[in-house]
């Protein structure tokens, strides 16, 4: 659902199993982010390109599962997660919330994933066009700003 649910629950630290992070897209283009599941876009949430084309995406502050990898302090991959996923569109000037298990967060590991900017379709028969290369996001406990 588009409504906040898990991220807003008050939970005692001793009963918590994850930290909730937010990912913001402050750009003027949509971005495609890797997800652990498929998320159906809401027709009310879209970006309209200058050529009039509309691209549906996630509504603001939706809770999702980001599909990320884990690296240690020496930049070595740590076995984590699974080897398949999906992707979702994060609209311009929007954000999503996603959990990171405390078992990863408290070990001072970094979570790592890529996103790509999306541009409008070149023609009716083309799929979305990537706009530039993948951009890596690397986040750990010391790089996150607390609210």
Image: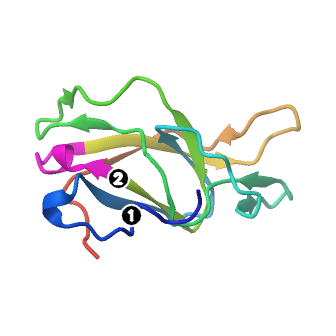
Percent of width and height locating residue 33: 51, 45
Q: Residues within 10 Å of mark 2 (few under 14, many from 20)?
A: some
Q: Nearer the viewer, residue 27 or 146?
A: 146
Q: Residues within 10 Å of mark 1 (few under 14, many from 20)?
A: some
SS at badge 1: loop
Q: Which mark is residue 20?
A: none
Disc 1 target residue = 7
Q: Nearer the viewer, residue 49 or 62?
A: 62
Q: Is residue 12 left or right of residue 25?
A: left
Q: Is residue 111 above or below residue 6?
A: above
Q: Quadrant of residue 15?
A: bottom left
Percent of width and height locating residue 81: 32, 30
Q: If the image is split into quadrants, where does the N terminus sit?
A: bottom right
SS at badge 2: strand
Taking the spot 54% from the left edge, 34% from the top edge, the residue there is: 86
Percent of width and height locating residue 134: 48, 39
Q: Quadrant of residue 80?
A: top left
Range of the magenta residues?
Answer: 100-110
Disc 2 target residue = 99
Pointers 1 and 2 in contact (CB under 8 A)?
yes
Q: Is residue 124 left or right of residue 104?
A: right
């Amino acid at each position: 659902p588009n409504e906040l649910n898990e991220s807003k629950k008050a939970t005692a630290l001793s009963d918590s199993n994850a930290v909730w992070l937010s990912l913001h897209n402050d750009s003027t283009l949509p971005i495609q982010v890797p997800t652990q599941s498929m998320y159906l876009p809401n027709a009310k949430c879209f970006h309209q390109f200058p050529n009039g084309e509309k691209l549906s995406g996630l509504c603001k502050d939706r809770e999702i599962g980001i599909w990320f990898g884990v690296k240690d302090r020496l930049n070595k991959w740590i076995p984590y997660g699974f080897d398949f996923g999906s992707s979702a569109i994060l609209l311009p000037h929007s954000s999503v919330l996603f959990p990171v298990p405390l078992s990863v967060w408290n070990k001072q590991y970094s979570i790592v994933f890529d996103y790509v900017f999306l541009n409008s379709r070149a023609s009716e028969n083309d799929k979305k066009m990537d706009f530039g290369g993948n951009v890596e996001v690397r986040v750990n406990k010391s790089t996150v700003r607390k609210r």
